[in-house]
Image: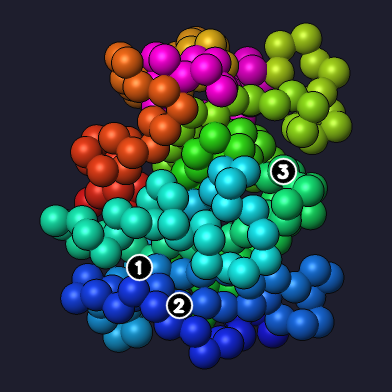
Amino acid sequence: MKDGTAIDVLWAPHAAGRFILRELPRDAADASRYAVWVPAGAENQRGLPVILALHGSGECGSDGQRPTTVGLGPVLPDAQSPCPALVVFPQARPDEVWCGAAAQRALATLDAVVAEFSADPKRVALTGLSLGGAGAWCLAAMQPQRFYRLAVVCGWLDVSHLQPELRTVAAPQRVVAERLRGVAVRIFHGAADTVVPRVGSRTMAAALHAAGVTVDYVEYPGVGHDAWVPTYRTSGLVSWLAGV
């Protein structure tokens, strides 16, 4: 069974869509709950784009709903222009980062949503904030062919969490950048971030430019770690991720 199982939880109904809660099948290696933003009319459409959104450390848990409360989730019901894409919110456990088992579950939730809604597997975008930003680099490096657009918000490339073959190379940022050829990338960071230094985003932006990857880097003067607020609300990123 590839598609997720409904567990009869529905919240934040809105004219633009709604959130639903799903659970990976119990026979999966590591079942878990995840949330999906379903745009209005999605049940009657095939081939919708999909956005995979990875949360930060504050949204870890097992309830399945907390990842929708920070970053992209709160924007979806309130956006002036509805997001015409399915948005998948997997959830990491409190002791996890977005690699290993958590990364595999995130990809499993993505597969489940694509199957359930007959979405377009060639139009899958990936985004993440803070811990999820580090995870977005990790997932993109692991399976770059899965994503056509990538947006990293106040994240960093954590070499210790990359695949084993990348941990010992002389220039992991360069190798990851080369793997992302063919993926359009946007990076966002607050210039006053004291939690995750902006140097990580600057380094990856430079590596991507050097590798010939299409990349835009936005740095917000005076903004701290919560760069996700202007990014998801005012930068036009949601429409870009949805392919509009």
Tell me how far mark 3 sits from mark 2, CA to CA. Answer: 24 Å
Amino acid type assigned to the residue bearing label 1 in the image: Leu
Instruction: Please give left or right for residue 15 compared with residue 37 in the image.
Output: left
**Badge number at residue 48:** 1
Circle nearer the N terminus (1, 2): 2
Q: Residue at x 54, y 29 (%)?
A: 155
Instruction: Please give left or right for residue 210 compared with residue 178 in the image.
Output: left
- Read off the magenta span: 173-198
**Badge number at residue 167:** none
**Badge number at residue 20:** 2
Please identify, in this view, whether the residue under mark 1 or under mark 2 is nearer the observer: 2
Q: Let me know if residue 77 appears in the view.
A: yes
What is the x, y in percent for residue 110?
Answer: 57, 63
Which residue does the numbered mark 3 point to in the structure image?
A: 97
Question: Relative to 95, is 89 above or below?
Answer: below
Amino acid type assigned to the residue bearing label 3 in the image: Val
